[in-house]
Image: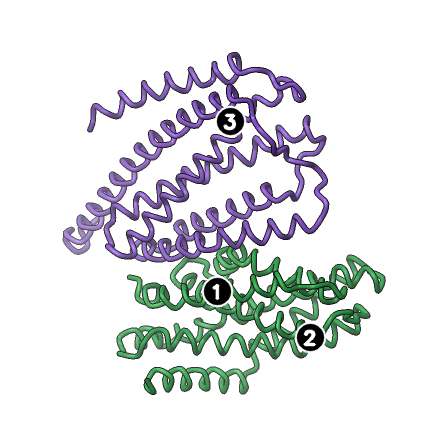
Chain colours: A green, B purple
Amino acid sequence: MSAPTGITRATLFKDLRLEWRSKDAINSMLFFSLLVVVVFSFSFDPTAEESRQIAGGLIWVAFLFAAVVALNQTWAREIRNQVLDAYRVSPAPANSLFIAKTLGNFIFVAVLEALMTPLFIVFYRLRALGPVWQLILVAALGTWALVVNGTFFAAMSLRTRSREIMLPLLLFPISIPALLAMVQSTTAILNGEGAHFWIVLLVTYDLVFTTACLLLFETVLNAE
Amino acid sequence: MKRAFPILGILTAILLIYALYQALVAAPTDQAQGDVYRIIYYHVPSAWTAFVLLFVNFGASVFYLIKRKPVADIVALVSAEVGVVFLTVNLVTGPIWARPVWGIWWTWDMRLTSTLVLWLIYVSYLFLRRFSSSGQTPLLAAALSVLGALCVPFVYFSIWFFRTQHPQPVIGGGGSIDPRMLHVLLINWLAFLCFAFLVCWSRYNLEVLQREVDHSQALESLMAPRGGAR
């Protein structure tokens, strides 16, 4: 029992240390989502009331696009020097690697969200009318939904030509229900309405897709 | 088997002609919409046929993941391709019908949106098949098909809730359908299913041939003397 968690921890800390030293993913994600925020505010020029209506959509679209930047880098590192091949011939369980990568991406995207949300609030003059803890819950569940599927599809698109284009092509259609739930619940909470249905939907989505990804990851990793 | 194909082809042609006659002439005219409504006999059966094919795709993918039989992979590929074509027919005939009846080409109504998302999921499946290298395609595609199928209930459920939250700009009807119309609808569906089966069958044969050709070409280039290969 301790061996798989040990592998997960080792891989996760290795990724975090690499990211801490290079700051490649977080810098590019931050700058990218900043650009999205600025471009959106130019194109819509909303008032405070309007921005409460559209902010849920804008914020999640910005995070979704930014997350793809981090997700594309997830496995690219392991391709160099055949690290992934070494992992495949080693007896280490595939799911430990998957969980480590997913947790790593979750942390990256969560840091991005924590840094970008204040900026969003300032730029769009947002003030939540509903409970803020629900927003945090929605953010955590939504980020997990994006990241668990994203890590899986990044491993899949690694095997394709033009892999950087392939990831969003695979990830976005399957993420539509989760994205809809994130956007709708965020908008509902900002406007002081109930979002229970969407939160339950997100929890179910997370459970179903985490299980499915864990069951299928080994097949995808070893596909020849 | 070889002889069954043309026989089924002729039967399907006869059935399609009969269904066309039923749809355009025999079926009663709709009281409210007039003759425009007759596109339903293409619109609805193509959607039902697509759903059947995509379900076959899911079943074949699961079977492939368990048993790793190449036949299951070919069935999954063929059913997804033909299913996407039928879904496209459904999505194209929809706006053609909506324009004269509803006055708009498109609305983000529950059924339209969920069908569009379904189409997107299976087009991305075909993209994956096209872009991955041939040895890994079957497994990756089967995994994606399972995830895509898992996504379908979420799509319907979320969009259903999303759309019932808001007033609908148009009402898609509901209520009952004339039994004579239902009868014609089912005949058309049967004809479409036969046609889809026929197309899948010939596409299946084509894919089998293609794989044999690829296989023998790969063998040939392995056997060819070094430097002697063209």
Q: CA distance from mark 2 to mark 1?
A: 22 Å
In the rendered image, residues at marks 2 and 3 fall on the same chain = no
Mark number displayed over residue B175: none
- Mark nearer the viewer, 1 or 3: 3
- Chain bearing tag 2 is A
Q: Inspect the image, locate mark 3, and give the three-letter code of the amino acid beneath it.
A: Tyr
- Chain bearing tag 1 is A
Q: Which residue is mark 1?
A: A149
| Vertical side of B27 occupied by B215: above or below | below
- Mark nearer the viewer, 2 or 3: 3
Q: Residues within 10 Å of mark 1 (few under 14, many from 20)?
A: many
Residue A186 location (% of width, % of height): 68, 65
Q: Which residue is mark 3?
A: B42
Q: Inspect the image, locate mark 2, and give the three-letter code of the amino acid beneath it.
A: Met
Identified at 61% across, 61% down, the residue is: A197
- In the shown orientation, is residue B15 left or right of residue A44? left
Identified at 39% across, 55% down, the residue is: B146
| Vertical side of B39 occupied by A206: above or below | below
- Chain bearing tag 3 is B
* The C terminus of chain A sits in image quarter: bottom left
Q: Which residue is mark 2?
A: A116
| Disc 1 secondary structure class | helix
| Disc 3 secondary structure class | helix
Residue B87 location (% of width, % of height): 49, 38
- In the shown orientation, is residue A87 left or right of residue B182? left
Circles 2 and 3: CB atoms closer than 8 Å = no
